[in-house]
Image (cartoon, rainbow, N blue to C red):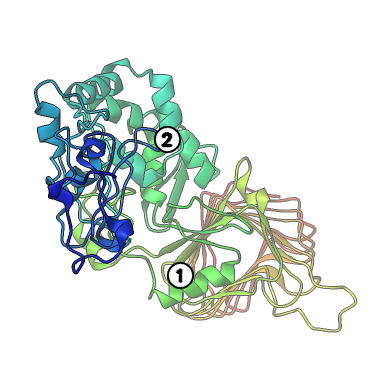
Amino acid sequence: MVRVSPLFRLNSSENKNPKEIMPSASFSSSRSYVRRSRRKGGHRIPLPSRTQSSEPCESVPCPNNVTGSAMAATACAGPSGSGGGGSPPVPAAAAATTAGHHSPYDLRRKSPPAYHEPGPSGTCSLPARKRPRTSLSQGVDVCNVSQYLQYELPDEVLLCILSHLTERDLCRVAQVCKRFNTIANDTELWKSLYQSVFEYDTPLMHPAPCQFEFVAADDCEADNPWKESFRQLYYGIHVRPNYRPKKDSRIKHFNTIRAALEYVEERGGSPSASACSCSCGTSACSCRRTPSAPAAAAPAPALLFVHAGLYQEECLAIDTDVQLIGCAPGNVAESVVLEREAESTLTFAEGANRSYAGHMTLKFSPDATSTMQHHKHYCLEVSDNCSPTVDHCIIRSASVVGAAVCVSGAGANPVIKHCDISDCENVGLYVTDYAQGAYQDNEISRNALAGIWVKNFANPIMRRNHIHHGRDVGIFTFENGLVSIYQLVEIT
Protein backbone atom coordinates (compact mmCIF):
# COMPACT_ATOMS: atom_id res chain seq x y z
CA MET A 1 0.00 0.00 0.00
CA VAL A 2 1.37 3.43 -1.04
CA ARG A 3 1.80 5.94 1.71
CA VAL A 4 0.31 9.38 0.95
CA SER A 5 1.67 12.52 2.51
CA PRO A 6 -0.81 14.53 4.52
CA LEU A 7 0.13 17.66 2.51
CA PHE A 8 -1.48 16.28 -0.60
CA ARG A 9 -4.44 14.59 1.06
CA LEU A 10 -7.72 15.66 -0.52
CA ASN A 11 -11.27 15.27 0.60
CA SER A 12 -13.52 13.23 -1.53
CA SER A 13 -16.02 16.07 -1.68
CA GLU A 14 -13.47 18.54 -3.24
CA ASN A 15 -12.11 16.28 -5.94
CA LYS A 16 -13.92 13.17 -7.03
CA ASN A 17 -11.60 12.40 -9.92
CA PRO A 18 -8.73 10.20 -8.73
CA LYS A 19 -6.65 11.14 -11.80
CA GLU A 20 -6.13 14.69 -10.52
CA ILE A 21 -4.34 13.54 -7.37
CA MET A 22 -0.91 15.31 -7.30
CA PRO A 23 2.28 13.18 -7.21
CA SER A 24 4.28 12.57 -4.07
CA ALA A 25 6.76 14.99 -2.56
CA SER A 26 9.69 12.83 -3.56
CA PHE A 27 8.64 13.01 -7.18
CA SER A 28 8.02 16.77 -7.13
CA SER A 29 11.52 17.57 -5.93
CA SER A 30 12.86 17.48 -9.48
CA ARG A 31 13.62 20.96 -10.89
CA SER A 32 12.90 20.01 -14.47
CA TYR A 33 9.23 19.40 -13.82
CA VAL A 34 6.78 22.19 -14.63
CA ARG A 35 3.75 22.32 -12.36
CA ARG A 36 0.33 22.26 -13.82
CA SER A 37 -1.98 25.14 -13.15
CA ARG A 38 -5.70 25.25 -12.79
CA ARG A 39 -5.84 28.35 -14.98
CA LYS A 40 -7.34 27.90 -18.36
CA GLY A 41 -5.23 27.68 -21.48
CA GLY A 42 -6.12 31.22 -22.60
CA HIS A 43 -4.24 32.66 -19.57
CA ARG A 44 -1.16 30.48 -19.72
CA ILE A 45 2.22 32.10 -20.40
CA PRO A 46 4.39 29.77 -22.48
CA LEU A 47 7.86 29.16 -21.15
CA PRO A 48 10.79 28.62 -23.46
CA SER A 49 12.22 25.18 -23.71
CA ARG A 50 15.91 24.45 -23.52
CA THR A 51 15.64 22.31 -26.62
CA GLN A 52 13.66 24.85 -28.63
CA SER A 53 15.31 25.82 -31.93
CA SER A 54 13.65 29.23 -32.39
CA GLU A 55 15.35 32.57 -31.78
CA PRO A 56 15.89 33.48 -28.12
CA CYS A 57 13.90 36.73 -28.09
CA GLU A 58 11.19 35.87 -30.59
CA SER A 59 8.03 37.94 -30.30
CA VAL A 60 5.23 36.23 -28.38
CA PRO A 61 1.58 37.19 -27.84
CA CYS A 62 0.98 39.36 -24.81
CA PRO A 63 -2.14 40.28 -22.88
CA ASN A 64 -3.61 43.65 -23.72
CA ASN A 65 -3.37 44.97 -20.17
CA VAL A 66 0.43 44.70 -20.02
CA THR A 67 2.63 47.62 -20.97
CA GLY A 68 5.32 47.42 -23.62
CA SER A 69 8.25 47.21 -21.17
CA ALA A 70 6.55 44.61 -19.00
CA MET A 71 5.66 42.51 -22.03
CA ALA A 72 9.24 42.58 -23.26
CA ALA A 73 10.52 41.56 -19.85
CA THR A 74 7.92 38.77 -19.48
CA ALA A 75 8.43 37.38 -22.95
CA CYS A 76 12.21 37.38 -22.82
CA ALA A 77 12.81 36.35 -19.19
CA GLY A 78 14.00 32.81 -18.52
CA PRO A 79 12.58 30.32 -15.88
CA SER A 80 13.14 31.14 -12.26
CA GLY A 81 15.98 29.37 -10.50
CA SER A 82 14.13 29.02 -7.16
CA GLY A 83 12.07 25.98 -7.89
CA GLY A 84 8.25 26.36 -8.25
CA GLY A 85 6.49 28.21 -11.07
CA GLY A 86 4.20 30.15 -8.76
CA SER A 87 6.62 33.06 -8.27
CA PRO A 88 6.21 36.16 -10.49
CA PRO A 89 8.44 36.46 -13.54
CA VAL A 90 11.72 38.25 -13.06
CA PRO A 91 12.54 41.16 -15.42
CA ALA A 92 15.38 40.71 -17.84
CA ALA A 93 17.51 43.45 -16.31
CA ALA A 94 17.17 41.94 -12.83
CA ALA A 95 17.91 38.46 -14.11
CA ALA A 96 21.04 39.68 -15.86
CA THR A 97 22.36 41.27 -12.67
CA THR A 98 21.67 38.29 -10.38
CA ALA A 99 24.89 37.07 -8.82
CA GLY A 100 26.08 33.72 -10.08
CA HIS A 101 23.34 33.44 -12.69
CA HIS A 102 23.88 33.82 -16.46
CA SER A 103 20.85 34.05 -18.75
CA PRO A 104 21.02 31.75 -21.77
CA TYR A 105 19.92 34.72 -23.93
CA ASP A 106 21.68 37.94 -24.81
CA LEU A 107 19.06 40.47 -23.77
CA ARG A 108 21.17 43.62 -23.90
CA ARG A 109 19.79 46.36 -26.12
CA LYS A 110 21.97 47.47 -29.01
CA SER A 111 20.39 50.93 -29.23
CA PRO A 112 18.93 53.48 -26.80
CA PRO A 113 15.72 52.24 -25.19
CA ALA A 114 12.58 53.04 -27.09
CA TYR A 115 9.17 51.94 -25.96
CA HIS A 116 6.80 50.87 -28.67
CA GLU A 117 3.15 50.14 -28.35
CA PRO A 118 2.06 46.67 -29.43
CA GLY A 119 0.85 46.37 -32.97
CA PRO A 120 -2.60 45.39 -34.12
CA SER A 121 -1.73 41.71 -33.93
CA GLY A 122 -1.09 41.93 -30.20
CA THR A 123 2.65 41.21 -30.52
CA CYS A 124 5.59 43.22 -29.29
CA SER A 125 9.08 43.39 -30.75
CA LEU A 126 12.35 44.95 -29.81
CA PRO A 127 13.21 48.24 -31.56
CA ALA A 128 15.38 48.00 -34.64
CA ARG A 129 18.99 48.96 -34.31
CA LYS A 130 19.72 52.44 -35.63
CA ARG A 131 22.95 53.71 -37.04
CA PRO A 132 24.41 56.72 -35.29
CA ARG A 133 24.07 59.93 -37.28
CA THR A 134 27.23 61.65 -38.38
CA SER A 135 27.36 65.38 -38.93
CA LEU A 136 29.83 66.64 -41.52
CA SER A 137 31.24 70.10 -41.36
CA GLN A 138 30.94 71.73 -44.79
CA GLY A 139 32.77 74.94 -44.00
CA VAL A 140 36.07 73.64 -45.29
CA ASP A 141 34.46 72.18 -48.43
CA VAL A 142 32.79 75.47 -49.33
CA CYS A 143 36.07 77.29 -48.97
CA ASN A 144 37.78 74.73 -51.16
CA VAL A 145 35.10 75.04 -53.87
CA SER A 146 35.31 78.83 -53.82
CA GLN A 147 39.09 78.67 -53.99
CA TYR A 148 38.92 76.24 -56.92
CA LEU A 149 36.39 78.25 -58.92
CA GLN A 150 38.11 81.58 -58.44
CA TYR A 151 41.76 80.61 -58.80
CA GLU A 152 42.35 77.00 -59.87
CA LEU A 153 39.66 76.25 -62.51
CA PRO A 154 41.26 76.63 -65.97
CA ASP A 155 39.99 79.43 -68.18
CA GLU A 156 39.34 77.01 -71.03
CA VAL A 157 36.96 74.94 -68.88
CA LEU A 158 35.12 78.02 -67.66
CA LEU A 159 34.80 79.37 -71.20
CA CYS A 160 33.36 76.04 -72.35
CA ILE A 161 30.77 76.17 -69.58
CA LEU A 162 29.81 79.78 -70.27
CA SER A 163 29.43 79.10 -73.99
CA HIS A 164 26.22 77.18 -73.25
CA LEU A 165 24.54 80.11 -71.47
CA THR A 166 22.12 82.64 -72.90
CA GLU A 167 22.92 86.33 -73.12
CA ARG A 168 21.00 87.15 -69.93
CA ASP A 169 22.72 84.45 -67.87
CA LEU A 170 26.08 85.51 -69.23
CA CYS A 171 25.53 89.07 -68.01
CA ARG A 172 24.55 87.76 -64.58
CA VAL A 173 27.65 85.59 -64.34
CA ALA A 174 29.76 88.68 -65.00
CA GLN A 175 28.55 90.09 -61.67
CA VAL A 176 29.84 87.19 -59.54
CA CYS A 177 33.48 88.17 -59.10
CA LYS A 178 36.31 89.90 -60.90
CA ARG A 179 37.57 86.76 -62.62
CA PHE A 180 34.10 85.77 -63.82
CA ASN A 181 33.56 89.31 -65.10
CA THR A 182 36.75 89.15 -67.14
CA ILE A 183 35.96 85.75 -68.66
CA ALA A 184 32.24 86.50 -69.22
CA ASN A 185 33.25 89.54 -71.31
CA ASP A 186 35.59 87.56 -73.53
CA THR A 187 35.45 88.78 -77.12
CA GLU A 188 35.43 85.33 -78.71
CA LEU A 189 32.69 84.16 -76.34
CA TRP A 190 30.38 87.01 -77.33
CA LYS A 191 31.31 86.64 -81.00
CA SER A 192 30.15 83.03 -80.96
CA LEU A 193 26.92 83.95 -79.19
CA TYR A 194 26.35 86.92 -81.51
CA GLN A 195 26.79 84.90 -84.69
CA SER A 196 24.49 82.16 -83.43
CA VAL A 197 21.71 84.75 -83.03
CA PHE A 198 22.31 87.32 -85.79
CA GLU A 199 24.61 85.40 -88.18
CA TYR A 200 26.56 88.53 -89.16
CA ASP A 201 30.27 88.23 -89.86
CA THR A 202 30.86 91.82 -88.68
CA PRO A 203 29.27 93.67 -85.75
CA LEU A 204 26.27 95.73 -86.86
CA MET A 205 25.89 98.98 -84.95
CA HIS A 206 22.48 100.57 -84.49
CA PRO A 207 23.14 104.01 -82.95
CA ALA A 208 19.74 105.53 -83.81
CA PRO A 209 16.42 104.54 -85.42
CA CYS A 210 16.74 103.73 -89.12
CA GLN A 211 20.54 103.86 -88.88
CA PHE A 212 22.58 100.68 -89.29
CA GLU A 213 26.27 100.38 -90.00
CA PHE A 214 28.66 97.44 -90.13
CA VAL A 215 31.85 98.26 -88.22
CA ALA A 216 34.96 96.09 -88.20
CA ALA A 217 35.80 94.73 -84.77
CA ASP A 218 39.27 96.29 -84.89
CA ASP A 219 37.90 99.73 -85.77
CA CYS A 220 35.18 99.81 -83.13
CA GLU A 221 35.72 102.02 -80.09
CA ALA A 222 33.87 99.67 -77.75
CA ASP A 223 35.91 97.27 -75.61
CA ASN A 224 33.80 94.35 -76.82
CA PRO A 225 32.17 95.28 -80.17
CA TRP A 226 30.22 92.01 -80.35
CA LYS A 227 28.60 92.58 -76.98
CA GLU A 228 27.90 96.22 -77.78
CA SER A 229 26.20 95.28 -81.05
CA PHE A 230 24.25 92.57 -79.24
CA ARG A 231 23.02 95.14 -76.73
CA GLN A 232 21.87 97.54 -79.44
CA LEU A 233 20.04 94.85 -81.44
CA TYR A 234 18.70 92.80 -78.55
CA TYR A 235 15.11 94.07 -78.70
CA GLY A 236 14.67 92.89 -82.31
CA ILE A 237 12.23 90.20 -83.48
CA HIS A 238 13.57 87.45 -85.73
CA VAL A 239 11.96 85.90 -88.80
CA ARG A 240 13.75 82.57 -89.12
CA PRO A 241 11.81 79.70 -90.70
CA ASN A 242 11.99 76.32 -88.95
CA TYR A 243 14.35 77.53 -86.25
CA ARG A 244 14.19 76.44 -82.62
CA PRO A 245 15.73 78.93 -80.20
CA LYS A 246 17.25 78.02 -76.86
CA LYS A 247 14.84 77.06 -74.13
CA ASP A 248 15.56 80.01 -71.85
CA SER A 249 16.02 82.62 -74.58
CA ARG A 250 13.64 85.58 -74.57
CA ILE A 251 14.25 86.52 -78.21
CA LYS A 252 11.08 86.19 -80.28
CA HIS A 253 11.18 84.05 -83.44
CA PHE A 254 8.58 83.68 -86.20
CA ASN A 255 8.40 81.67 -89.41
CA THR A 256 6.94 84.42 -91.64
CA ILE A 257 7.24 88.18 -91.95
CA ARG A 258 3.47 88.55 -91.81
CA ALA A 259 3.30 86.76 -88.45
CA ALA A 260 6.01 89.02 -87.05
CA LEU A 261 4.22 92.16 -88.26
CA GLU A 262 0.96 90.97 -86.71
CA TYR A 263 2.77 90.45 -83.42
CA VAL A 264 4.12 94.00 -83.59
CA GLU A 265 0.64 95.38 -84.23
CA GLU A 266 -0.78 93.44 -81.28
CA ARG A 267 1.92 94.84 -79.01
CA GLY A 268 1.13 98.35 -80.18
CA GLY A 269 4.37 99.08 -82.00
CA SER A 270 7.85 98.61 -80.63
CA PRO A 271 8.74 96.53 -77.58
CA SER A 272 9.09 98.19 -74.20
CA ALA A 273 11.94 100.60 -73.67
CA SER A 274 13.40 98.39 -70.95
CA ALA A 275 13.85 95.56 -73.42
CA CYS A 276 16.08 97.63 -75.68
CA SER A 277 18.25 99.05 -72.93
CA CYS A 278 20.09 95.93 -71.81
CA SER A 279 20.39 92.30 -72.79
CA CYS A 280 20.47 90.93 -69.25
CA GLY A 281 17.60 92.81 -67.64
CA THR A 282 19.35 93.25 -64.29
CA SER A 283 19.46 96.60 -62.54
CA ALA A 284 23.11 96.30 -61.53
CA CYS A 285 24.46 95.35 -64.95
CA SER A 286 27.35 97.45 -66.17
CA CYS A 287 26.10 97.37 -69.76
CA ARG A 288 22.83 99.14 -68.93
CA ARG A 289 22.30 102.43 -70.68
CA THR A 290 19.93 105.24 -69.74
CA PRO A 291 17.81 106.43 -72.67
CA SER A 292 17.87 110.10 -73.45
CA ALA A 293 14.80 112.24 -73.03
CA PRO A 294 13.74 112.21 -76.73
CA ALA A 295 14.22 108.46 -76.93
CA ALA A 296 12.16 107.96 -73.78
CA ALA A 297 9.39 110.15 -75.20
CA ALA A 298 9.37 108.40 -78.61
CA PRO A 299 10.38 104.73 -78.41
CA ALA A 300 12.30 103.24 -81.28
CA PRO A 301 10.31 101.51 -84.03
CA ALA A 302 10.00 97.76 -83.93
CA LEU A 303 12.97 95.92 -85.40
CA LEU A 304 12.52 92.77 -87.52
CA PHE A 305 15.48 90.63 -88.56
CA VAL A 306 14.68 88.66 -91.73
CA HIS A 307 17.08 85.73 -91.90
CA ALA A 308 18.42 84.08 -95.04
CA GLY A 309 15.83 82.55 -97.33
CA LEU A 310 13.40 83.09 -100.20
CA TYR A 311 10.12 84.71 -99.16
CA GLN A 312 7.71 84.46 -102.10
CA GLU A 313 4.27 84.39 -100.49
CA GLU A 314 4.72 87.57 -98.48
CA CYS A 315 2.59 90.53 -99.58
CA LEU A 316 4.08 93.35 -97.52
CA ALA A 317 2.22 96.65 -97.15
CA ILE A 318 3.69 98.64 -94.26
CA ASP A 319 1.76 101.56 -92.78
CA THR A 320 3.44 101.82 -89.38
CA ASP A 321 6.87 102.47 -87.96
CA VAL A 322 8.81 99.23 -88.36
CA GLN A 323 12.37 98.39 -89.40
CA LEU A 324 13.10 95.38 -91.64
CA ILE A 325 16.69 94.31 -92.11
CA GLY A 326 18.26 91.23 -93.65
CA CYS A 327 20.18 88.91 -91.38
CA ALA A 328 22.68 86.42 -92.82
CA PRO A 329 26.40 85.65 -93.06
CA GLY A 330 28.45 86.80 -96.04
CA ASN A 331 26.64 89.08 -98.48
CA VAL A 332 23.45 89.78 -96.58
CA ALA A 333 21.44 91.39 -99.38
CA GLU A 334 21.97 88.44 -101.73
CA SER A 335 20.96 85.90 -99.07
CA VAL A 336 17.59 87.45 -98.13
CA VAL A 337 15.21 87.56 -101.10
CA LEU A 338 11.65 88.90 -101.17
CA GLU A 339 9.93 88.05 -104.46
CA ARG A 340 6.42 88.49 -105.83
CA GLU A 341 4.72 87.54 -109.09
CA ALA A 342 1.58 89.63 -108.56
CA GLU A 343 1.18 93.05 -106.94
CA SER A 344 4.07 95.04 -105.54
CA THR A 345 6.74 93.26 -103.56
CA LEU A 346 7.13 95.92 -100.82
CA THR A 347 4.83 98.90 -100.30
CA PHE A 348 5.15 101.78 -97.84
CA ALA A 349 1.84 103.55 -97.22
CA GLU A 350 0.68 106.52 -95.17
CA GLY A 351 1.84 106.24 -91.56
CA ALA A 352 5.24 104.72 -92.28
CA ASN A 353 7.16 107.81 -91.23
CA ARG A 354 10.08 106.08 -89.49
CA SER A 355 10.15 102.82 -91.40
CA TYR A 356 13.24 101.08 -92.70
CA ALA A 357 14.08 98.34 -95.19
CA GLY A 358 17.66 97.34 -95.72
CA HIS A 359 20.14 94.63 -96.71
CA MET A 360 17.75 92.50 -98.78
CA THR A 361 16.83 91.74 -102.39
CA LEU A 362 13.47 92.89 -103.79
CA LYS A 363 12.28 91.10 -106.92
CA PHE A 364 9.19 91.53 -109.04
CA SER A 365 8.84 88.64 -111.50
CA PRO A 366 5.38 88.63 -113.11
CA ASP A 367 4.31 85.70 -115.21
CA ALA A 368 4.76 86.54 -118.87
CA THR A 369 1.71 84.49 -119.86
CA SER A 370 -0.55 86.22 -117.34
CA THR A 371 -3.22 88.63 -118.63
CA MET A 372 -2.98 90.82 -115.50
CA GLN A 373 -1.76 94.35 -116.09
CA HIS A 374 1.39 95.17 -114.11
CA HIS A 375 1.93 98.81 -115.03
CA LYS A 376 1.03 99.80 -111.45
CA HIS A 377 3.00 97.04 -109.71
CA TYR A 378 6.60 97.53 -108.67
CA CYS A 379 9.44 96.03 -106.69
CA LEU A 380 9.30 98.98 -104.30
CA GLU A 381 6.40 101.40 -104.01
CA VAL A 382 6.29 104.52 -101.82
CA SER A 383 2.93 106.28 -101.68
CA ASP A 384 1.91 109.66 -100.27
CA ASN A 385 2.50 110.93 -96.71
CA CYS A 386 5.27 108.56 -95.71
CA SER A 387 9.03 108.86 -95.42
CA PRO A 388 10.73 105.45 -95.18
CA THR A 389 14.44 104.70 -95.49
CA VAL A 390 15.61 102.09 -98.01
CA ASP A 391 19.25 101.15 -97.62
CA HIS A 392 21.63 98.62 -99.25
CA CYS A 393 18.91 96.83 -101.23
CA ILE A 394 19.20 94.98 -104.55
CA ILE A 395 16.20 95.79 -106.75
CA ARG A 396 15.33 93.72 -109.82
CA SER A 397 12.19 93.91 -111.98
CA ALA A 398 11.26 91.65 -114.87
CA SER A 399 8.13 93.63 -115.76
CA VAL A 400 8.19 95.19 -119.22
CA VAL A 401 5.77 97.91 -118.11
CA GLY A 402 5.99 100.35 -115.23
CA ALA A 403 9.21 100.76 -113.27
CA ALA A 404 11.26 98.98 -110.64
CA VAL A 405 10.86 101.75 -108.01
CA CYS A 406 7.90 104.16 -107.93
CA VAL A 407 7.61 107.18 -105.60
CA SER A 408 4.35 109.08 -106.04
CA GLY A 409 2.01 111.39 -104.17
CA ALA A 410 2.25 114.55 -102.11
CA GLY A 411 4.15 114.01 -98.90
CA ALA A 412 6.11 111.06 -100.26
CA ASN A 413 9.61 111.82 -99.01
CA PRO A 414 11.74 108.68 -98.82
CA VAL A 415 15.49 108.26 -98.40
CA ILE A 416 16.86 105.69 -100.85
CA LYS A 417 20.61 105.14 -100.54
CA HIS A 418 23.29 102.58 -101.39
CA CYS A 419 20.83 100.59 -103.53
CA ASP A 420 21.51 98.68 -106.73
CA ILE A 421 18.72 99.25 -109.30
CA SER A 422 19.98 97.35 -112.31
CA ASP A 423 19.00 94.93 -115.07
CA CYS A 424 15.36 96.01 -115.11
CA GLU A 425 13.19 95.57 -118.19
CA ASN A 426 11.85 99.12 -117.99
CA VAL A 427 12.60 102.33 -116.05
CA GLY A 428 14.76 102.05 -112.98
CA LEU A 429 13.43 104.88 -110.73
CA TYR A 430 10.16 106.74 -111.31
CA VAL A 431 9.31 109.90 -109.25
CA THR A 432 5.99 111.63 -109.95
CA ASP A 433 2.94 113.53 -108.62
CA TYR A 434 4.60 116.09 -106.30
CA ALA A 435 6.78 113.48 -104.67
CA GLN A 436 10.13 114.40 -103.20
CA GLY A 437 12.85 112.46 -101.44
CA ALA A 438 16.61 112.07 -101.24
CA TYR A 439 18.37 109.55 -103.50
CA GLN A 440 22.07 109.16 -102.87
CA ASP A 441 24.96 106.78 -103.52
CA ASN A 442 22.85 104.49 -105.71
CA GLU A 443 23.98 102.29 -108.58
CA ILE A 444 21.49 102.57 -111.47
CA SER A 445 22.65 100.67 -114.54
CA ARG A 446 21.78 98.38 -117.45
CA ASN A 447 18.08 99.23 -117.53
CA ALA A 448 15.96 98.86 -120.68
CA LEU A 449 14.73 102.47 -120.62
CA ALA A 450 15.88 105.58 -118.76
CA GLY A 451 17.60 105.25 -115.45
CA ILE A 452 15.38 107.90 -113.78
CA TRP A 453 12.04 109.43 -114.78
CA VAL A 454 10.84 112.65 -113.11
CA LYS A 455 7.44 114.14 -114.00
CA ASN A 456 4.33 115.98 -112.83
CA PHE A 457 5.86 118.52 -110.40
CA ALA A 458 8.04 116.02 -108.63
CA ASN A 459 11.19 117.46 -107.05
CA PRO A 460 13.70 114.79 -105.94
CA ILE A 461 17.25 115.43 -104.69
CA MET A 462 20.02 113.37 -106.29
CA ARG A 463 23.45 112.99 -104.64
CA ARG A 464 26.42 110.92 -105.76
CA ASN A 465 24.44 108.51 -107.94
CA HIS A 466 26.15 106.37 -110.57
CA ILE A 467 23.89 106.06 -113.62
CA HIS A 468 25.44 104.22 -116.53
CA HIS A 469 25.07 101.69 -119.35
CA GLY A 470 21.36 102.20 -119.83
CA ARG A 471 19.61 101.66 -123.15
CA ASP A 472 18.07 105.12 -122.90
CA VAL A 473 18.92 108.43 -121.24
CA GLY A 474 20.20 108.67 -117.70
CA ILE A 475 17.67 111.16 -116.21
CA PHE A 476 14.51 112.12 -118.10
CA THR A 477 12.36 115.02 -116.81
CA PHE A 478 9.04 116.04 -118.40
CA GLU A 479 5.64 117.49 -117.49
CA ASN A 480 7.00 120.05 -115.03
CA GLY A 481 9.34 117.66 -113.35
CA LEU A 482 12.30 119.17 -111.48
CA VAL A 483 15.49 117.51 -110.31
CA SER A 484 18.07 118.87 -107.86
CA ILE A 485 21.39 117.23 -108.61
CA TYR A 486 24.38 117.45 -106.27
CA GLN A 487 27.78 115.84 -106.75
CA LEU A 488 26.80 113.68 -109.68
CA VAL A 489 29.24 110.83 -110.07
CA GLU A 490 28.57 109.78 -113.65
CA ILE A 491 25.87 109.63 -116.30
CA THR A 492 26.71 107.60 -119.35
Q: Which residue is mark 2?
A: 53
Q: Where's the N terminus, which quadrant?
A: top left
- The x and y percentages for residue 190 are 42, 35
Which mark is drawn over residue 120? none
Q: How many marks?
A: 2
- The x and y percentages for residue 308 are 64, 52
**Most foreground residue, 478 or 440:** 440
Work out how far the residue at label 1 is from the one at label 2, CA to CA, in angstroms.
105 Å
Question: Furthest-top residue in view?
Answer: 152
**Residue 242 is drawn in which quadrant?**
bottom right
Q: Is residue 481 above or below residue 274?
A: below
- The x and y percentages for residue 94 are 9, 34
* Residue beneath the point at 28% across and 59% down: 274
**Residue 85 is drawn in which quadrant?**
top left
Q: Which residue is mark 1?
A: 387
Q: Identity of the amino acid at label 1?
A: Ser
Q: Is residue 54 above or below residue 383?
A: above
42 displayed left or right of 404: left
Residue 438 appears in the figure: no
| Classed neighbour count for the residue bearing mark 1: other residues with Cα under 10 Å, few (<14), some (14–19), many (≥20) | many
Q: Name the element at disc 2.
A: loop
* Residue beneath the point at 35% across and 62% down: 300
Marks 1 and 2, the one that precedes in the sequence:
2
- The x and y percentages for residue 447 are 76, 59
42 displayed left or right of 455: left
Residue 327 appears in the figure: yes
